[in-house]
Image (cartoon, helix red, strand yellow):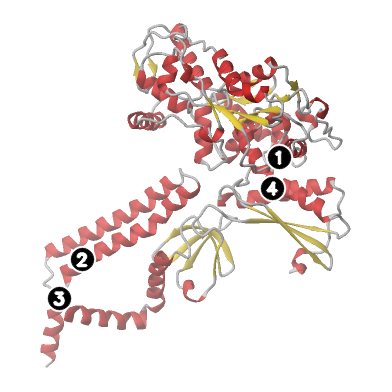
Amino acid sequence: MPESSEQPTAWQWVPESQFEVPPTPTTIAIKRWWLSLQAKLQSADDEEAEAPQSSDAVNVNMQKGLVALDKRLSAWLDDTDDSSIKWIICPPHAGVDVIARDFCQQHSLQVLSPPPRDELTLDALDLTLGEENSTTGWYIPELAHGFIRQSKGLRWVRHFFAKAMSGELGKGVVICDSWAWSFLQTLWPTGHLDTLTLQAFSAQQLTQLGFEKEQEHLQHLASLSRGNLGIVSAYAERRFRRQASHPGAQQSRFEMPSMPAEATDYTAFVLHMLLIHQGLSLRQLRQVLPIISPSQLDVELYSLRSSGLVALTDEVWRVTAIGYPTVRQALKSRGLWLDRF
Amino acid sequence: MDTESVKNVAGLFKEITATTLIEIAVIAVLAWLAVWLSQRVIPWLANHLHGKRRLYTLALVPMLRIAILVIALLLIVPLIIEPTLQNMVAVMGAAGLAIGFALKDYVSSLIAGIVAIHEMPYRPGDWVEVDGVYGEVKHIGMRTVELVTNDDTVIWVPHLKLWDNLIHNANNGGPSLMCVAEFYIRPQHDAFIIRDALEDIALTSPFLQLAKPVTVTLNEEPWGTRYRLKAYPIDPRQQFQFVTDLTARGKQRLLELGVTFSEVETTQAH
């Protein structure tokens, strides 16, 4: 389905503090609660099913997000006297990081990459930050890759913060995953940074972007994803694929993956570590969670993969877009440190 | 005269009929059933929750039980005794005399149990130390409090201990419980490097409650330097694993930094 006509309100870049999660209508909250209760008691086949409806895969044009970001930052970019840093905070799977990187590349900002993650714990860590490029402007493609939550793995990111805060690096853009950002703020608490993120998408804005017209489902998706476009797209795409592969079959409207029944604190720690690092290899996971034995870690990953909550891509384990809402809720209920998106 | 005394005593009580007995039995059974249910359903529900919500839910158990028992008593007493002031004074006087002689400690524990529910020196889910025993409060009964130690040993402590013992409550009804990992190091080292390394050890522990502060203190002893790494786990139940994680990773890091651990027995340090 093509995206509808230009709707400037759908793509809004706002400071992190102004991010607002779309509300969850009470009826949807009750339905979701009831179905989660049913899911515990019955098999998945017995869940509430809906009649199949016509639905197309939605190909969201992120270009409008880029245009909106360009508009938002054009005055800052043109001001040669302004050497401040813009911090772009990206919820997982939302596509904010892709837009931000495109923006930086479009304006020919110099890449300032952290050392490879496996080198962050080396005694001879290279702390060079490429200060010589400060006059042309720079960007960090993903600050979450600049640390590893291990006793020697925080040195580079601390060094970076010290340099950035002192103004030595000059004008630049830092792109950072929201979970990593939340953790890094405990490491380097700063209250007055110039942060930006994409405002959450409400059901109405999702309609503008071309998602299906059924309001209740869109409201459900908007609140489930907390306005995260990537999560909405993943759920819409899954629905589309299922309908394409099983035409005429009934689908559960509110179906979500659930946490493994045998989930423990260790399961939550694995998921939390994957989120704050924006994915880790098995070796790195063992490094950050030495309290979990290697065989137990394998069991946890297998169990999470079977539940559809994590996936292995290019030897890196990541939380899936479909599993993210379930994971976030599970981490919240266990009192783990969350992002604010 | 004797016949008149018997008549006076008998006058305190109502005529006990079969119906009265059945009513009393029904009230007692319903009360017992309600208590039994509350003691199973609420902990079951609480164990599906975490942090504050778990602790607050668990705290409902003793309160609900005392409320049920009071209601049952208020319903039963008027069925047996004519509830006039004179009658109540007479019955309570007699009961007090019997209790004073025969059931002093038992009743003292019961009363301490009621005081414990009001003052809350311990609640279900709290980690307390009473009389040298440290464990999690699993259940607050009428007469005793049930603790489960880290070695999975169940210990019943009479509420009576409340009157004259020090009760150490490590988390006092909340999810924050400070843990301390200790390191004993020979004195020839740079203390600030060690302090920073230990702070990072806590910051990188998955158990750490990030909203709470991490502190490192040290003091010199005749045999070397004692470091105390203080931090809070996410859930009080994780305290032993948290300290294990801090200690294991702390040792590993300190060895990398080339420090030498003291070999003096820690008990001599206190």
Look at the numbered discs 1 and 4 and tell me whether their residues touch, using CB distance below 8 Å. Answer: no
Q: Nearer the viewer, residue A336 or A108?
A: A108
State how far apart marks 3 and 2 are (Cα): 12 Å
A171 sits left or right of A6 in the view: right
Q: Which residue is mark 4?
A: B202
**Amino acid marked by disc 2:** Ile
Q: How crowded is the residue under tag 3: few (<14 C-alpha within 10 Å), some, or many (20+)?
A: some
Residue at horizontal 17 percent and vertical 70 percent from the top:
B80
Q: Position of residue B52 (x, y in %)?
A: 48, 49
Q: Is residue A316 above or below residue A331?
A: above
Residue A113 to residue B38: above or below: above
Quadrant where the N terminus of chain A is found in the figure: top left
| Disc ID at residue B13 | 3
Give the foreground label among 4 and 3: 4
Q: Are marks 2 and 4 in contact (CB under 8 Å)?
A: no
Q: Which residue is mark 2?
A: B76
Which residue is denoted by mark 1 in the rendering?
A290
How far across and down, in percent of the image, does residue B126 sit? Answer: 51, 58
Disc on res. A110: none
Q: Are marks 3 and 1 in contact (CB under 8 Å)?
A: no
Q: Earlier in the sequence, mark 4 or mark 3?
A: 3
Give the alpha-carbon distance from disc 2 to disc 4, as whole Å: 57 Å
Q: Are marks 4 and 3 on the same chain?
A: yes
Q: Chain of mark 2?
A: B
Upstream in sequence: badge 2 or badge 4 = 2
Q: How far apart, in angstroms, are the residues tagged by discs 3 and 1?
A: 71 Å
Element type where label 1 sits in the image: loop
Q: Amino acid at mark 1?
A: Pro
Inspect the image, locate mark 3, and give the three-letter code of the amino acid beneath it.
Phe
